[in-house]
Image (cartoon, rainbow, N blue to C red):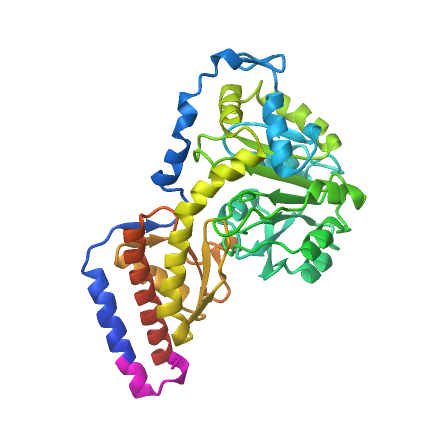
Amino acid sequence: MTLQQMMPDELRVFYEAALKEYESCKAKGLKLDMSRGKPAREQTVLSDDLFDIDIREHFISDGVDAGNYGGFDGLPCCKRYFAELLGVQFDEVFAAGNASLSLMYDTISKAYTHGLLRSPEPWCKLDRVKWLCPAPGYDRHFKICQSFGMELITVPMTSDGPNMDLVEELVKDPDVKGIWCVPKFSNPDGIIYSDSVIDRMAALKPAAPDFVIMWDNAYCVHEFEGEFLPFRDILTLCREAGRPDMVFEFASTSKVTYPGGGIACFAASKDNMDYMKKLMSIQTIGFDKLNQLRHVLYLKDKEHTIAHMKKHAALMRPKFELVEEWLSREIAPLGIGHWHKPLGGYFVSFFAMPGCAKRINELAAEAGVVMTGAGATYPYGKDPEDSNLRIAPSYPPLEELGEAMAVFCACVKLAAAEKLLNK
């Protein structure tokens, strides 16, 4: 029987039981963290052999001294590695430092200060700049836009990706300058964009000549269930559609080797690349080529990287299965929540009864379980339904994750019972 089907007396009995269950969880004095999608140490240790590689005999790589200035856009071997991984051309890759998020921020920043390649003028001179934000989405994407004073427009996510009917309508506004996309295992829903969505994205005819698709391919090799799923090359699709300069693609090894200690890149058309190099050459002489070399010697190529990620999958899969087990047993029969079951990535996107997410988050914090703030997956941190919560199972050990899910489910039940009783 679902909670909505219960008579008032039955609901009060359920509430008392849920309160007792919650107080029991709270009495344990837990201190558990499910706030961010962090790899556990058992995952990062998989790459510890990286430190045993003697890179000194490889310092001269394709004629570039990895231990000196030069190679501004990255070691050729690193550019080849990312080109194969993403399925793009060698000269479309800029291999950089440790964080793709920094490259994303830098792209938006340069659009404001200098404009993009097709910009009539820098965005800072415009009266308004609007940005499309598929939601639920990645909170750090939204905060980049907010930091530049953009007007954020929510685009609902569907099971295939962003609502393209709405996107195609919104880009008719010349003030709309771009859209965030996480095309494979989207953050937080774990959705894989369908071929139809990707084709329509590449075929967009925006009114703004400098409209840009920010294609954050963060989880391109991050399956934890099933075999590797190939993905479309958005650069080629945009080029074939006659808009080669409309997209920037980003990727990194942050959840392949070490968060904060990996390598990152962006990929773009040759004209975009030439333009960005002119701007970036002023801010840096080059990125850490020694780390680029170390990673390429360790990860080798796409095949070896996918094999390495299967080791991650073996550690991640039981954690997501445990989350699914708890939600299916404790929440689904009561009709007080639903979620998308991902095949990869780092999150489970949970939708509670409308009006309950903040209360669930508050209850969980009081019981010692820290989660990403309610509303964080929407622009301005405002979930119109107060429903979505991002579950990040990767970091806690299995035993602690089980304890955290017991708390979470108790909070969902208690918040739902409170909501219905207050009606």
Judge left or right: residue 271 versus residue 193: right
Q: Residue at x 69, y 44 (%)?
A: 234
The front one of 155 and 18 is 18
Residue 352 among magenta residues: no
Q: Where 374 sits versus 272, above or below?
A: below
Write down the quadrant of residue 270 in the picture: top right
Taking the spot 26% from the left edge, 59% from the top edge, the residue there is 367
The quadrant of the image that shows the N terminus is: bottom left
Q: Which residue shows up at 68% across the image and 61% down it?
A: 166
Quadrant of the drawing holding the C terminus: bottom left
- Residue 133 vs residue 319: left or right? right
Q: Is residue 36 visible?
A: no
Write the residue at 63% across / 27% down.
80
Residue 9 in view (yes/no): yes
Please provide percent x and percent y for residue 417: 34, 75
Q: Residue 413: x, y in percent?
A: 33, 71
Image: magenta residue range: 1-13
Residue 235 in picture, x, y percent from top left? 71, 40
In the rendered image of this protein, does residue 8 appear above or below residue 258?
Answer: below
Depth order, front residue of 402/309? 309
**Residue closer to the observer: 134 or 399:** 399
Toward which corner of the image does residue 165 lie, by quadrant? Answer: bottom right
Asked if residue 8 is among those painted magenta in the image, a careful observer would answer: yes
Q: Quick check: 238 left or right of 18?
A: right
